[in-house]
Image: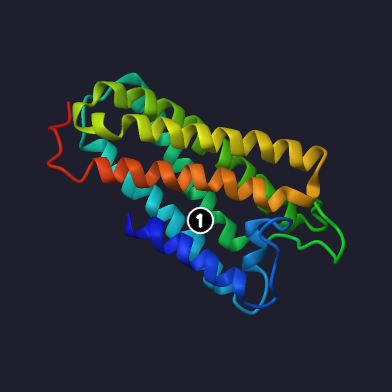
Amino acid sequence: MALVGAYVAIDVVLQLLPPHYSPVADAESNLAVGPFGWVMNLNFLARAAMTFCVLVVVAHIGRSTKTRRLGSPLLALAGLCSAALVFFPTDVNAPGEFGIAPTTMVGAVHVAFATTGFLLALAAMTLLTIWMRGAPSLARVRRAAAVMLGVAVAGLVSLAVSIAWVPSVLGLTERLCLLGILGWAFVVCFGGRERPEAPL
């Protein structure tokens, strides 16, 4: 949970620092390009670490069902995609340009990892939210997890729409998706704070 809070706080601080990217128009990955880009790279690694913290919580709760066995490796791969972003910085648009238009091979690889990571995370979250129905110790956060999943899905759909038709709000839609993903991770970890059930 601390990693989720730290991730959000760092994102907010970076938005206030040069070169002052727009949280509405510019992708979050732009924060890794500039004088404080190294801080955002640490944040990408923190997101990967957060993913594996969620996996540890999930592994120690409830039954090992098919949905958990499918969802867990997908979530792990999503975390690895986040870590990979550190090594492949994005291509920043020129002033007045919007959307995603890689101009280098490195930038194209970044987009590929980012896109794959989002899709894997959403697939994993869906499977693990279904699995939570059979985990009594997560009953109190089950609805909140479903809500956060809904936010993430809405964000991803909005992101696709913004890329295709309204690129000037790409940053906002991406952050909506991230809000759902981070919120879901927070909720699952919060629910797992109590003594875990013996895994089966």
Residue 33 seen anywhere in this rendered image of the structure: yes
Q: Residue at x 45, y 48 (%)?
A: 182
User: Residue 118 sits in which quadrant?
Assistant: top right
Q: Nearer the viewer, residue 193 or 141?
A: 141
Q: Is residue 74 visible?
A: no
- In this view, 128 is above or below 134: below
Whole-percent x and y of residue 178?
54, 47
Q: Residue furthest right?
A: 96
How many numbered discs, if any? Answer: 1
Residue at 20% in and 26% down = 136
Q: Nearer the viewer, residue 171 or 34?
A: 171
The residue located at (54%, 66%) in the rendering is 12
Which residue is identified by label 1?
Answer: 83
Q: Residue 170 versus residue 74: which sits nearer the camera?
A: 170
Residue 149 vertical placement versus 131 (above, below): below
User: Is disc 1 placed on a helix, strand or loop?
Assistant: helix
Q: Is residue 113 left or right of residue 75?
A: right
Which amino acid, mark 1?
Ala
Q: Quadrant of the N terminus?
A: bottom left
In the displayed structure image, the side of residue 55 where residue 199 appears, left or right? left
In which image quadrant can residue 18 be found?
bottom right
The percent coordinates of residue 131 (x first, y second) are 33, 24
Give neighbour class at mark 1: few <14, some 14-19, many 20+ (Cα, 10 Å). Answer: many
- Looking at the picture, tell me which residue is in the foreground, 199 or 195: 195
What colour scheme does the image use?
Answer: rainbow
Q: Quadrant of the C terminus?
A: top left
The quarter of the picture where residue 72 lies is top left
Where residue 135 sits: x, y (%)? 23, 26
